[in-house]
Image: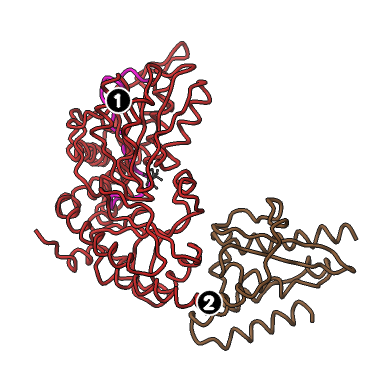
Chain colours: A brown, B red
Amino acid sequence: MTINEIQEEIIEEFAGFEDWMDKYAYLIELGTDLQGLDEKHQTDQNLIKGCQSKVWFNASLEDGKVKLEADSDAIIVKGIAALLIRVFNNQTPEDIMNADLNFIDEIGLKQHLSPTRSNGLVSMVKQIKMYGIAFNHVK
Amino acid sequence: MTLDINKIRKDFPILQEKVHGKDLVYFDNAATTQKPTQVIDEMVKYYYKYNSNIHRGVHYLSNKSTDGNENARKIVQNFINAEHLHEIIFTRGTTESVNLVANSFAERYIGEGDEVIVSELEHHSNIVPWQLVCEKKKAVLKVLPFNDKGELLLDELDELITDRTKIVAVNHISNSLGTINPIQKIIDIAHARGVKVLVDAAQSVQHLKIDVQEWDVDFLVFSGHKLYGPTGIGVLYGKEDLLNEMPPWQGGGEMIKEVRFSGTTYNELPFKFEAGTPNYIDAIGLGAAIEYVENIGLENIDAYEQELLAYATEKLSSIDGLKIYGTAEHKTSVISFLVDGIHFYDMGMLLDQMGIAVRTGTHCTEPIMQHFGIDGTVRASFSFYNTKEEIDALYNGILKVCKMFVH
Ligand SMILES: Cc1ncc(COP(=O)(O)O)c(C=O)c1O
């Protein structure tokens, strides 16, 4: 699926939630289910700065596709990271670089988007895009 | 006297607001307090009717604004019972007050090998300015530790002090744990060894009556915005003889007597330390805030807040897996806590969805978090405009969050 198709899918899923409790319960579920990162990847280099919680993103390039893994000590943040992985994992560096993210807005997580917000959603997206740029360069 | 909380709440327009469609429950009072209309109106009045740059003005408006500013200074003087009006210096807040003292005091009194003592309970703003000047002066920063209840190890203070110690900088009340420190004893111990004391009262002027003469404290600093006043205004109290001996910190207008390229002379206290156009409207707002608080009465405020603290401590303690950090015998209305298996940030975010405002993280006190081996806490801090019903809402909110986490 393309990045946009996955975004559409997520938006539809979230449209089904009646209230904030359901939405956050789902994020908690996603966070709980996301396979974490090996301790060896929980490095300072992979740590995204400026968050109240710790978030790590690890990326590698396999057959021209970016493989993403993430972890966080806060479950909701990990749930948000899981959504980002769903959108960006297995995409090409170029598609990641050029992606236009609209799902965050649409599913009502926009309040977490402003650059000074402590969960660092902006920093996570920035980091993933940086990986895209870096791998595109390598390619 | 019992407080009429419903009436008091009407003084604070923001408390009527809805957040995410729910009634706002504001439990972030240790970060900043809300402002009563009495404060907002007073400031608006000055902007509408009297605004003009103060001091040396020849015209009506300038005199009005100057009077407002100097009247506010008088209110602050009475509030902390300073001996002299000119011992009250207006700053931007606690942080700026500490920086002013650290820099100016160090310039005059601290040299290579001298020592400054802070406590392990301090807010970063009473640590970092001292680290900076110690680095500059090649002085040594020493730390007075606390026990696992969050109480300072007072017995160790006397041992920490040497004949090179120049100043002890300590807070009256910890913003993270709520501990009320035994300031009188600290001052007595320090003074017996000829050491000066700065007290960070950012978390105490809104709860407890402070008398700087009774304490015989050398410097006292606090912020207006935690005392129901505006942001951007704070106070430095210093003893006259010290302030007179200390050099100016910032240069500019207002703080000079005569400016010559051959050498400038400085204005007298307090203006020597108030360079540039003062923040007189906020000073006037601070004056109004102090009058508001004094009208209600700090004793009444403290009694009611202690009631809230006892109620909340009991309720929250009954929650499975909830641990309170900061269990000192003498505490103000602050509860820092964690629930097993739930990150403070998740807790804060979910409570927010229920309209409950708490603070999460390190609360600018990383050494305290390191002491407990944690990354942060959830902190609920109560003010006299809060109610037991709101504490029930917090209690139920935490239970709800806990339920979301057991699957
Ligand atoms: C104990 C204590 N000291 C200092 C400060 C700093 O105050 P301000 O940010 O108003 O300068 C605070 C406020 O967070 C505090 O709680």
Front one among A31 and B322: B322
Q: Is residue B4 above or below residue A44?
A: below
Front: mark 1 or 2: 1
Question: Magenta segment range?
Answer: B227-246
Callout 2 amino acid: Tyr
- Whether residue B237 is visible, yes or no, is yes
Callout 1 amino acid: Ala
For disc 2, the marked residue is A24
Q: Measured from the top left, where is residue B391 in percent x and y?
A: 29, 68
Q: Residue at x 36, y 29 (%)?
A: B168
Ligand 1 neighbours mark 1 (CB distance < 8 Å): no
The circle on residue B388 is none
Front one among B327 and B359: B327
For disc 1, the marked residue is B190
Q: Residue at x 23, y 65 (%)?
A: B9
Taking the image as four quarters, which one is ligand 1 found in? Answer: top left
